[in-house]
Amino acid sequence: MMSSVLKANPIHDVDIQLTSAEAWDRVRRRLRAELGEDVFSSWFGRLELVEISGSMVFLSVPTRFLKSWIQSHYIDRLRALLVEEFKDVSDLSLSVRGALGKPAQRPSVAHTTEQTQTERSFPERNKVDTIALAEGKPASENDALTGAPLDRRLTFTNFLVGKSNALANAAAEHIVQNTAGEAPLYNPLYVHAGVGLGKTHLLHAIAHETTAQGRRVIYLTADRFMYGFVSALKAQTALNFKERLRGIDLLVIDDVQFLQGKSIQQEFCHTLNALIDSGRQIVIAADRPPTDLESLDERVKSRLAGGLVVEMGPLDEGLRVKIIEARIASARQHQPGFEVSPSVISYVAKTIVSNGRDLDGAVNRLLAHSTLTGGTMTVESAEIAIRDLVRTREPRKVKIEDIQKLVATHFNVSRADILSSRRSASVVKPRQIAMYLAKVLTLRSLPEIGRRFGGRDHTTVLHAVRKIEGAVNADVMLKDDVELLKRMLQD
Ligand code: ADP
Ligand code: MG
């Protein structure tokens, strides 16, 4: 740890380096004292300081899961401690480090992991200009409100419509066509869908189109909103930040499930209210419906749910075919020899059922395969080319009841015990494991899981999930047990 701090820190003065190592040590000690050894070692044991650059502290963790957990549960606390312990620091960036212990890419606040994946699938994809609110201002002053970069490919033209996304698409087009300055009909428009089902694509399409109409648009991820707000507070330009946010025509916020922190939520709520009241459009995307945003307070949730809430479902087979064909057509612009027969397309569409991102990955593999071998692609060769993606396709739908039965049998208790209020250790542990499995294997929300476990509170479920997450890290036997149960439920 020390050595990575010393090496990576661009500041060369040894005293300052030691000071940062000490400050980092203090942050860790304070976290441990606040959270207790268990929680600390589960979530922060593998958190590492990468470097300090300007007012940013760059941290890394080994998995995406840890990153999103810290992001959704502890980011405010972590930021506050860093700001207190490090001189001149105002924010942090958390990234997932690669196998070599280095961050997979230079961490950047504006990029979500998702965007990074998209970049990987389409390395030639161009990033266009960011939507800056106040043009001509120096970058530093403008930083807080510079939207995340818009991806040029994510347009309405490229957004293919099927049953699952027709309503969301129609709502998006309605918003874009409302140029007459009338009060928006659907405000906010709240789109939710699982990963890779086109939320970001649709949001970018809206932002592109409205920008082209000369309207003032800001596209932000929730991370970026928080960052903007916190750094504006630091720089004592919060008022400015608010005024500028409120001076726009359209605010687009992606991945709002990551919004955290009391004061930030309050600010977010004020911003929503101010924009909605003055007839400006807001578009939000998240991976779940407003009622399931566990970390948000009720007022924010109800405001988010107060407009039009639309879900985008899984891509049906016809839509998958259309997306694959479109991807092949665009790849052919660079690789004219890239031929894929209808039977191969149909095979891929039937096999890759998960999401648009995996479809992108499949076409990239077909392309690589055909470039390398030069031969015609058969269903057999396609099967080999996309084999690794097939394994990661969406797991079978698991029922909470099945989880309860299997876990009960496995631990030699009854399902009634699991649902009961008995607190003996022999029942508590299986119950917590079952709740944990319900959270990771189904799409049910915490309150819903609580209800299905004998009417428990969602915080009890959350506690169980954390507990088991922590315990499997520390206990190899338990980890194997849980893995085994997962496999049995999914096969
Ligand atoms: P999300 O934000 O919901 O996780 P994205 O918008 O990043 O998903 O979509 C993942 C990939 O799938 C992107 O490359 C996107 O262009 C593609 N995709 C998803 N839905 C569609 C669609 N309806 N038409 C065309 N491409 C789509
Ligand atoms: Mg997205």
Image (cartoon, grey):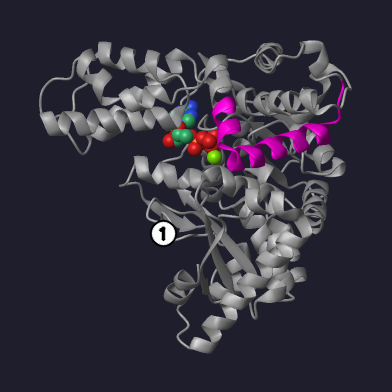
Rendering coords of residue 71 (x, y %): 64, 51
Residue 51 vertical placement versus 350 (above, below): below
Q: Which residue is at 68% across, 54% downward?
A: 40
Q: Which residue is mark 1?
A: 102
Which quadrant of the figure has residue 481?
top right
Which quadrant of the figure has residue 352?
top left
By secondary structure, the bulk of the magenta-drawn segment is best described as helix
Rendering coords of residue 477 (x, y %): 57, 32
Q: Which residue is at 76% across, 24% downward?
A: 431
Ligand 2 quadrant in view: top right
Q: Is residue 480 left or right of residue 392?
A: right
| Residue 22 showing in the rendered view | yes
Tell me the kind of residue under disc 1. Answer: Lys
Q: Nearer the viewer, residue 426 or 89?
A: 426
- First to last magenta residue range: 455-482
Q: Is residue 268 left or right of residue 42?
A: right
Rendering coords of residue 65 (x, y %): 56, 42
Q: Nearer the viewer, residue 395 or 468?
A: 468
Query: For residue 309: magenta?
Result: no
Q: Is residue 465 left or right of residue 105?
A: right
Query: For residue 481: magenta?
Result: yes
Residue 61 vertical placement versus 158 (above, below): below
Which residue is outermost to the left?
374
Q: Which residue is at 42% across, 42% downward?
A: 118
Rendering coords of residue 457 (x, y %): 86, 30
Q: Residues within 10 Å of mark 1 (few under 14, many from 20)?
A: some
Q: Which residue is at 70% across, 44% downward?
A: 282
Which quadrant of the figure has residue 141?
bottom right
Looking at the rendered structure, the secondary structure element under dot 1 is loop
> So how many labels did they put on this image?
1
